[in-house]
Amino acid sequence: MTTLDTDFVRAQFPAFAESSLRGQAFFENAGGSFTCQPVIDRLTRFYRSRKVQPYGPYEASRLAGEEMDEARARLAAMLGVKTDELSFGPSTTQNAYVLAQAFRQWMSPGEAIVVTNQDHEANTGPWRRLADEGIEIREWAIDPETGHLNPEDLAELLDENVRLVCFPHCSNVVGEVNPVVEITATAHAAGAFVCVDGVSYAPHGLPNVGEMGADIYLFSAYKTYGPHQGLMVMRKTLGEMLPNQAHFFNADTLYKRFTPAGPDHAQVAASAGMADYFDALADHHGITGDAAARAGGVHTMMRAHETELLQPLLDWLAARNTVRLLGPRSAQGRAPTVAVDVGRPALEVARELAPHGIMAGGGDFYARRALQAMGVDPERGALRLSFVHYTSKAEIDRLLGALEKTL
Ligand SMILES: Cc1ncc(COP(=O)(O)O)c(C=O)c1O
């Protein structure tokens, strides 16, 4: 397998050349990543020369509309789904909210939805609120020690009443990668659809949603090197079955059915820059094939780099008996999103890390249910150290040095 060229990678991100950020290592990537150059270029170009109503009969408008279509088509191909199965909304939270309204109309009282307490609130709260409409909510609960979501426990929650299973590809505090293929197969066998929150996973490589089999897959472009958009894969079978949430005359256009807000034209267009970036990585590293294959190759390379950098951090934290490392101790099958209970308000520790050139976060990260279930007071919160493929070994060393002085 090709090794990721981090110099090449970092050259694609203006943040690394920014003097105001010099000497600071970024470890709050799970909150939002740096933006890659092609996205910034496209956003700037759009605002300068294409900022007109798109899809009109004049040149600037035609280019604007084409760029928006290009973003959807290229990213959908990378995700292994059809172009009209991918849509853009203001955020994942809002996309999930709209979906919950569609399911509310589609389901009957007495039918059930399975939710987890491992999720960010975005993929659990809107579903839980359907209890007010007579929908039964069943909680698939994590192990209080490890935060692990056991697929065997799901089987016990399923019966013919369950219409939907909502779960994260990876939690933003536990970090463990859940086996989406296996979980989806279990849900499908019981006649239920799945809604997967991929927000914490997608920054580590775009998954092949088509191959994984998920009916709905959500992620946020501002964490995958792009602009502030929520991306939603909605497979055709389910999308045509659920009631339309958009203007009545848009009901026949799958990618508009669950995004009632008017699109942010510039940001949708600029999202094509994420495809440029992943393609540039593929080209640079000699990865070939169709769009999904190239994205898959890039994904594998990113994960290998991250896994190598992650293990020393996990080992260091696991050996420190004044802190509790949440989630798995092995980098395999784990995202480099590492939350630790530091026994005092986590934000204080994040603040103390800042003068050492570490940008990290402390809080509940909207995963209050997961923290509570693991016995961590959400008010105290967790210190979160999250990185991605552009992080270097030198930055990990800097982090370990700063933790040594702070924890
Ligand atoms: C795992 C996870 N899901 C969902 C969200 C919500 O995404 P958005 O900010 O696009 O609504 C976040 C944001 O932090 C997240 O980390």
Image: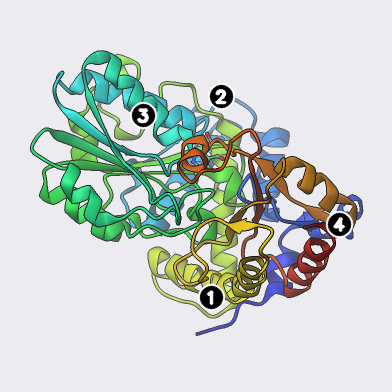
Q: Is 109 situated left or right of 115 in this image? A: left
- Decide which of 291, 144 is in the foreground and name it: 144
For the residues labelled 2 and 3, the Cα–Cα distance comes to 17 Å
Q: Which mark is residue 357?
A: 4
For the residues labelled 3 and 1, the Cα–Cα distance comes to 36 Å
Residue type, numbered disc 3? Lys
Query: Label 2 belongs to which residue?
Result: 53
Label 1 with label 2: CB-CB less than 8 Å: no
Residue lying furthest left: 160
Question: Which of the two discs, 3 and 1, labels the residue nearer the N terminus?
Answer: 3
Question: Which of the two discs, 2 and 3, labels the residue nearer the N terminus?
Answer: 2
Label 3 with label 1: CB-CB less than 8 Å: no
- Residue 86 visible to the viewer: yes
Whole-percent x, y for residue 56 in the image: 50, 26
For the residues labelled 4 and 3, the Cα–Cα distance comes to 44 Å
Q: Is mark 3 on a helix, strand or loop?
A: helix
Q: Is mark 4 on a helix, strand or loop?
A: loop
Residue type, numbered disc 2? Gln
State which quarter of the image contains the C terminus: bottom right
> Which residue is at a point 33% across and 60% down the rendered structure image?
179
> Which residue is at a point 15% across and 18% down the rendered structure image?
109
Q: What element carries label 1?
A: helix
Query: Label 1 belongs to which residue?
Result: 304
> Which residue is at a point 47% across and 27% down the rendered structure image?
94
Query: Label 3 belongs to which residue?
Result: 256
Asked which quadrant contains residue 237, the reply is top left
For the residues labelled 4 and 2, the Cα–Cα distance comes to 43 Å
Question: Which of the two discs, 4 and 3, labels the residue nearer the N terminus?
Answer: 3
